[in-house]
Image (spheres, rainbow, N blue to C red):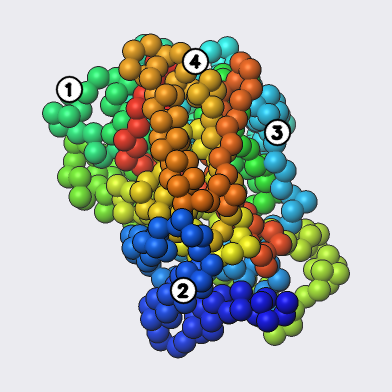
């Protein structure tokens, strides 16, 4: 038994030792992956195609960002520690993290947070709907802004809203018209930014009609921030997301460093976006290249610099904090920290905001996702959930060519946002079912039904929009990976139900 366990652990241990080779990260990574693939080759199933064992090696290369484990850091962070070479790493106590269960809870919490906000409200979404629930949210913002002016000691409350230009401008009544009263009444306190993809320009912009122009690219961040509290979600600001459209929602309480980062990130994307004015016109921030009238390359370079400055600045701050916390000459105990006035519990949860803005050549989410799937080993369990199952060939090869277990949760056709839509959009659920069946047939042909499992979400009268990835690793106690996508070249189909495949 002991010999068998040692043999199974051999490839993983070998890869970790190779990771310590000084000045040879590329060689170490290649030899490590070959070692792991050889280990998999020993116990592959009889019906498994041998070429799939090379899938992780043949998939698009990702930068090598691994680093040796830090022996001073808390146990459980080592496996994800390399991600902080790409994005800031935030350590929080799990007591400050709450996962919300329902759209109604999400809506009520958001209204409650707006009502008590004193310093800042930051909201980034694809769009704001135009129904009574969305109006209730706008009214809540207006009341809070009014109270901030009437208070005995007026606050410096600022409201910043980031939406997508094409989606937020669709129709005569739209996100812009919903927010104009706030801009007109509180011009010094409210900012509305509308991101316009640089890929939609010239003749293309003139010819593609509303609804379909969103397929060229979108602003896709979904973050809702109130002072130092944050809701990270995939939900848009629309009535279905407040009632019967199931999504994911993570509420982070009293996390000032994370709140500062997302405020700066939304500000950065806002600075490279068009600014909504009180007369429903838009303007470019002074000194910024116009996203679709100016030079595309110059705009993308400026946007890349603006966003990456935020990421790198926050990453540097968090690395200094990490060094002070775990590598200082005199490490404070939790009791000492409490005596010094810091009453926050010690961190046991680590948050990495993954950013994807492909037009600006920012592909951090892609790098991390591919690396995690490539390095998934025996004993690991990967959870994937999506309302729209359409894995790229590279991801399918990685799923079929690694030894980790996969549990994939999909939307059943009836809870797909396009179900029952008019025209071509009504066929989209059937198209996703076809893709799903093709994939599962390949899983079955390789005899991997036990290792790769697919499940469909169904609930009468509801739709399903949750998207995310999780990894349960053999030596990992707890880990949180949060994905953000913004300014992505979407290439998505837009439905008749008023929403995009987002």
Q: In this view, does 400 lie above or below 277?
A: below
* Residue in front for this viewpoint, 481 or 400: 400
Instruction: Determine the secondary structure under disc 3.
Output: loop
- Whole-Å distance between the Cαs marked 1 and 3? 42 Å
Mark 3 Cα shell of 10 Å, populated few (<14), some (14-19), many (≥20): few
**Which circle's residue, 4 or 2, is located before the other in the chain?**
2
Residue beneath the point at 68% across and 24% down = 104
**Which circle's residue, 1 or 3, is located before the other in the chain?**
3
For mark 2, what is the residue? 38
Q: In this view, does 171 lie above or below 470?
A: above
- Mark 3 vs mark 4, foreground winner is 3
- Whole-Å distance between the Cαs marked 2 and 3? 42 Å
For mark 4, what is the residue? 130
- Whole-Å distance between the Cαs marked 1 and 4? 26 Å
Taking the view exactly as shown, the residue that stands out farthest to the left is: 203
- Whole-Å distance between the Cαs marked 3 and 4? 24 Å
Residue 455 location, quadrant:
top right
For mark 3, what is the residue? 101
Q: Is residue 233 above or below residue 173?
A: below
Q: Image check: 57 left or right of 465?
A: left
Q: Where is residue 51 in the image (x, y as percent from the top left)?
A: 36, 61
Q: Image check: 65 left or right of 105?
A: left
For mark 1, what is the residue? 207
- Mark 1 vs mark 2, foreground winner is 2
Q: In which quarter of the image is the N terminus?
A: bottom right
Taking the view exactly as shown, the residue that stands out farthest to the front is: 46
> Is there any visible trace of residue 434 in the rendered image?
yes
- Mark 2 vs mark 3, foreground winner is 2
Residue beneath the point at 47% across and 77% down = 35
- Whole-Å distance between the Cαs marked 4 and 2? 56 Å
Taking the view exactly as shown, the residue that stands out farthest to the bottom is: 22
**Which circle's residue, 1 or 4, is located before the other in the chain?**
4
């Amino acid at each position: 038994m002991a010999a068998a366990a040692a043999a199974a652990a051999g490839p993983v241990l070998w890869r970790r030792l190779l990771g310590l080779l000084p000045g040879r990260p590329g060689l170490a990574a290649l030899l490590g992956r070959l070692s792991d693939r050889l280990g998999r080759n020993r116990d592959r199933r009889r019906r498994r195609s041998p070429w799939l064992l090379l899938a992780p090696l043949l998939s698009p290369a990702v930068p090598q960002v691994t680093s040796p484990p830090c022996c001073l850091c808390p146990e459980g962070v080592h496996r994800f520690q390399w991600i902080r070479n790409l994005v800031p790493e935030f350590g929080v106590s799990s007591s400050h993290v709450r996962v919300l269960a329902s759209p109604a809870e999400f809506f009520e919490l958001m209204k409650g947070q707006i009502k008590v906000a004193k310093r800042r409200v930051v909201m980034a979404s694809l769009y704001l709907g135009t129904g009574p629930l969305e109006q209730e949210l706008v009214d809540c913002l207006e009341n809070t802004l009014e109270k901030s002016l009437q208070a005995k000691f007026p606050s410096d409350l600022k409201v910043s809203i980031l939406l997508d230009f094409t989606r937020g401008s669709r129709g005569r009544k739209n996100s812009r018209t919903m927010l104009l009263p706030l801009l007109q009444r509180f011009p010094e306190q409210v900012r509305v930014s509308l991101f316009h993809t640089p890929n939609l320009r010239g003749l293309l912009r003139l010819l593609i009609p509303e609804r379909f122009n969103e397929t060229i690219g979108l602003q896709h961040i979904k973050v809702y921030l109130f002072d130092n509290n944050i809701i990270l979600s995939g939900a848009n600001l629309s009535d279905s997301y407040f009632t019967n459209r199931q999504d994911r929602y993570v509420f982070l309480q009293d996390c000032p460093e994370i709140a500062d980062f997302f405020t700066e990130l939304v500000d950065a994307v806002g600075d490279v976006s068009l600014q909504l004015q009180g007369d429903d016109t838009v303007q470019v921030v002074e000194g910024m290249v116009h996203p679709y009238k100016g030079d595309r390359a110059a705009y993308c370079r400026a946007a890349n610099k603006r966003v990456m400055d935020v990421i790198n600045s926050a990453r540097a701050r968090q690395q200094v904090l990490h060094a002070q916390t775990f590598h200082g000459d005199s490490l404070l105990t939790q009791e000492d920290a409490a005596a010094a006035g810091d009453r926050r519990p010690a961190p046991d949860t680590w948050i990495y905001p993954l950013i994807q803005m492909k037009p600006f050549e920012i592909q951090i989410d892609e790098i991390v996702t591919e690396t995690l799937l490539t390095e998934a080993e025996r004993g690991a369990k990967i959870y994937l959930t999506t309302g729209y199952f359409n894995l790229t060939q590279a991801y399918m090869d990685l799923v079929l060519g690694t030894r980790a277990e996969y549990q994939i949760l999909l939307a059943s056709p009836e809870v797909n946002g396009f179900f029952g839509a008019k025209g071509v959009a009504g066929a989209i659920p059937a198209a996703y079912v076809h893709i799903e069946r093709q994939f599962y047939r390949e899983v079955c042909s390789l005899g991997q039904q036990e290792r790769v499992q697919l499940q469909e979400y169904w609930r009468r009268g509801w739709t399903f929009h949750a998207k995310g990835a999780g990894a349960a690793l053999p030596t990992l106690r707890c880990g949180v990976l949060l994905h953000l996508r913004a300014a992505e070249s979407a290439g998505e189909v837009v439905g008749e139900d008023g929403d995009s495949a987002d």
